Amino acid sequence: MSCTQTTTLDQPEQQQIPLNFSVSSEAHEPAVGEFGDTTNAISQAPTGLTKSYILTTTNLTSFGVVSSYTGTGNFNTNTSSGSLPNSMYNVDVSRSSSSNPWDYSPDYFWPASTSNKLSFFAYAPHSSDCGGAVSISSQSTRGVPRLYYTVPSDPTSHIDLLTATPRLNLTRTTGTVSLAMKHVMAKFAFYVKKWN
């Protein structure tokens, strides 16, 4: 009698690998002062003009993530037939201080196969920390997610808004997803100085 069934015992079940993030923010150039002087013009202006402060890698405490699972295919940017945000949708990733790790709930994991891909889009701060000024496109929007910002009429409610360079077609071999944030807003302060 011969046996034709094979059971593989030496291959462990595929381990679930959680999605982890690291964030960096570009350096912000100083404002230009009088006649091209590189002295920080903001420091010369009256205080209390706006609430907005410059977000950096150190003081950033939240960001939003949208991700798309595309199987073995690449992310499709087409707005009528493209990829959907079918993995993570506006997930609030946060930390209480720069010495704490980034955290979110519930946990999300890399696809089991090394051939399957995820694409990531992120912005900061998360919309829940923006007093209604920031929103993103719906889960039924195809292609690259859209970020919407409504400038508050009260200058003390303005925020520094950042977006990450999209990370497309990553696999579980990527490990930690590094997000490079860039400023999308500019802060202007005008003041009048009397000339003699």
Image (cartoon, rainbow, N blue to C red):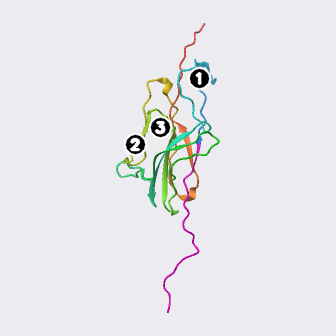
* Residue 117 in picture, x, y percent from top left: 49, 57
Residue 39: quarter of image: top right
**168 or 134, which is in the foreground?**
134
Q: Are marks 3 and 2 in contact (CB under 8 Å)?
A: no
10 Å neighbourhood of mark 2: few (<14), some, or many (≥20)?
some
Q: Which mark is residue 42?
A: 1
Q: Is residue 147 magenta?
A: no
Q: Amino acid at mark 2?
A: Ser
Residue at the limit of the structure toward the left, as seen here: 80
Under mark 1, the amino acid is Ile
Expressed as whole percent of the image width and height from the top left, the position of residue 118 reads: 49, 55
Q: Secondary structure at mark 1?
A: helix
Which circle's residue, 1 or 2, is located before the other in the chain?
Answer: 1
Where 73 falls versus 139 (above or below)?
below
Q: Residue at x 52, y 78 (%)?
A: 7
Mark 1 against mark 3, which lies toward the viewer?
A: 3
In the picture, the disc for residue 128 is: 3
Left of 131 or right of it: where is 39?
Answer: right
Quadrant where the image shows the C terminus? top right
> Circle 2 sits on which residue?
137
Quarter-of-image position of residue 43? top right
Magenta-drawn segment: 1-23
Cα–Cα gap, marks 3 and 2: 15 Å
Q: Report the disc number at residue 101.
A: none
Q: Residue at x 58, y 45 (%)?
A: 102
